Amino acid sequence: MSAAGEFAMHWQANGLEYGIPKQVDVWLAQGRSVLVNGSRGYLDEARRRYPGLLAVRLEVKPEVLRARLLARGREAPQEIDQRLARSARLQACPDPSVHVLDNSGSLATAVCTLIDLLRQQGVSV
């Protein structure tokens, strides 16, 4: 899909490749709100492409993230350690324009907090 130009955005992180389909541009042109799961490492490029972007970082306590990743079973312990180190590096230089939400608790709590933030920022949900 990347070689065919089918992504609005694409990047690599944690040894994997990720992409957001071009369809988001159609939705935005229609005036719709779009929520995507991106990468802190790609945020500068995403902001260049979408100047009105509302950046939200979900932060998870390292011990909670480790437990979640181990339970998921997709990555070896060494890969999880690398992922946690990358997360710590990216959090070491916080961006004051990024809204930070704690995702260390339940999914329901994180979703409610995100919806509240979106409403506060004038995003229709």
Image (cartoon, rainbow, N blue to C red):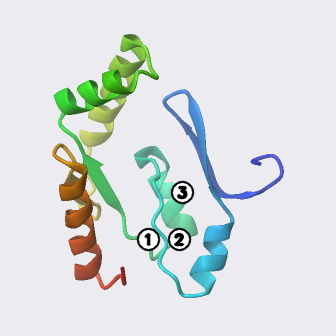
From the top left corner, tell me how far across and down residue 113 is, in percent. 20, 64
Q: Determine whether label 2 and label 3 are within 8 Å by CB.
A: no
Residue positioned 36% across, 30% down in the render: 86
Residue 111 lies in quadrant = bottom left
From the top left corner, tell me how far across and down residue 36 is, in percent. 48, 60
Q: Determine whether label 1 and label 2 are within 8 Å by CB.
A: yes
From the top left corner, tell me how far across and down residue 101 is, in percent. 21, 56
Image mark for residue 50 = 2
Image mark for residue 53 = 1
90 lies above or below 22: above
Image mark for residue 45 = 3
Image mark for residue 91 = none
Q: Secondary structure at mark 2?
A: loop
Which amino acid does the dot numbered 2 rest on?
Tyr
Between residues 8 and 33, which one lies in front from this camera angle?
Answer: 33
User: Label 1 vs label 2: CA separation?
Assistant: 5 Å
115 lies above or below 79: below
Residue positioned 42% across, 13% down in the render: 76
Residue 69 lies in quadrant = top left
Which amino acid does the dot numbered 1 rest on?
Leu
Left or right of residue 104, residue 45 in this image: right
From the top left corner, tell me how far across and down residue 124 is, in percent. 37, 84
Q: Secondary structure at mark 3?
A: helix
Between residues 115 and 41, which one lies in front from this camera angle?
Answer: 115
Q: Secondary structure at mark 1?
A: loop
Answer with mark 2 or mark 3, whichever residue precedes in sequence: 3
Tag in front: 1 or 3: 1
61 lies above or below 5: above
Local crowd at mark 1 within 10 Å, few (<14), some, or many (≥20)? few
